[in-house]
Image: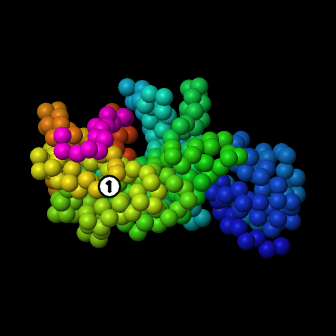
Amino acid sequence: MSVTIPLHDLKGLLPDQLRQLATDLGEPSYRGDQLFEWLHVHQARDLDGMTNLPARFRQVLAEAGAQMPGLELLESSASDTGKAVKFLFDLGQGGNGQGLGQVEAVLIIDGDRRTACLSSQVGCALDCKFCATAQMGFVRNLHAGQIVEQLHRLHQEAQRRGERLTNIVMMGMGEPLLNYEQVTCALRLARASDGQLQIGGRKMTVSTAGHVPGILRLSEDDLNVGLAISLNATEDETRSQIMPINRKWPIADLMAAAKTYFDRKGRRVTFEYVLMDQVTDLDADADRLAVLTSSIPCKINLIPYNELAPGLQISDRVYRRPSSARLDRFTRRLKNATRHTVTRRDSRGRDIDAACGQLHRRVTDAQSAVSATPQRA
């Protein structure tokens, strides 16, 4: 009996992979469909509860090393505004007994939309100077099943409220395009017609700090998801200071990739632009932003900077949120200079460190991020 499908993450396997797994183990392919239903509709946590699967099949799966690693909910916190709920999950322990780390995910409540903001990595390697996740450094990529498990937990919270998830954004911890295979697999699972969620690609958005090869790869993918680019500066010197990825793929390359994405997908790109006092909120920035985006069908989303909690600054410079007057001035100037839709995001969850750029796993001792013991709430 030869098994050709990886078994370390059953929840991260696509329907055709589960059918192949069933046949590899000597079962009819429809057993894979039953397995998918248990994993993604009933959200089973172990093989024993899959009662319509033959005991011999469950035993063979277990003996072959099939695993269903789950997430332990350490804590959840709701925003005072009622517009966000943040969840802190522990990934458990690896084979060496060391903790695999923790990630955060956020349920965003906005009108009739219920959006799952999901993490793709534990930590992040990109070192953006204004982002809390950067203080963790990079720990590891998440498996597709761990991304889907976040989605299931947020879906359960929405159900508890008598609602359902409508949108998915890959805007949590990590750079999604540096974990491309697992992220796109998770999104395929979320849209699967025989799954519980059935969220289409037009309701999914992948955000990137500017990984140009990943953008081009995504432009050729059949997922047809939305693309959001964290631009955050209008000239290379400033962007390289606050987002070191710009040293590898400067603004001109990034804008060319964005144009390619639109040309191939026919979907407007969203440019996210964080407004930081006296850094990215100058009149000249508004003018340059209008010029940079003039040839790309897009939306521009202005995000007033969400200041980090004490101890999370990773730069010698302390970034500040602009005053309301400066925010209004920049917004007006940009709207007058561009034909594109310009919005200013009312970041949800600032009071619980759940807003844009605030997600982080607190490191509470001198251990490295890789080996830090998870702290139970």
Vertical relation: 328 (above or below) 319: above
SS class of the residue under badge 1? loop
User: Is residue 85 shown left or right of residue 239?
Assistant: right
For image coordinates 67% across by 58% down, the residue present is: 14
Residue 305 percent location from the top left of the image: 24, 43
Q: Amino acid at mark 1?
A: Ile
For image coordinates 39% across by 50% down, the residue present is: 268
Residue ranking furthest to the bottom: 2
Q: Quadrant of residue 208?
A: bottom left
Vertical relation: 362 (above or below) 182: above
For image coordinates 57% across by 46% down, the residue present is: 200
For image coordinates 37% across by 25% down, the residue present is: 81
Q: Which residue is mark 1?
A: 296
User: Is residue 328 shown left or right of residue 352?
Assistant: left
Q: Quadrant of residue 44?
A: top right
Residue 181 percent location from the top left of the image: 54, 64
The verdict on residue 232 being magenta is no
The magenta segment: 336-349
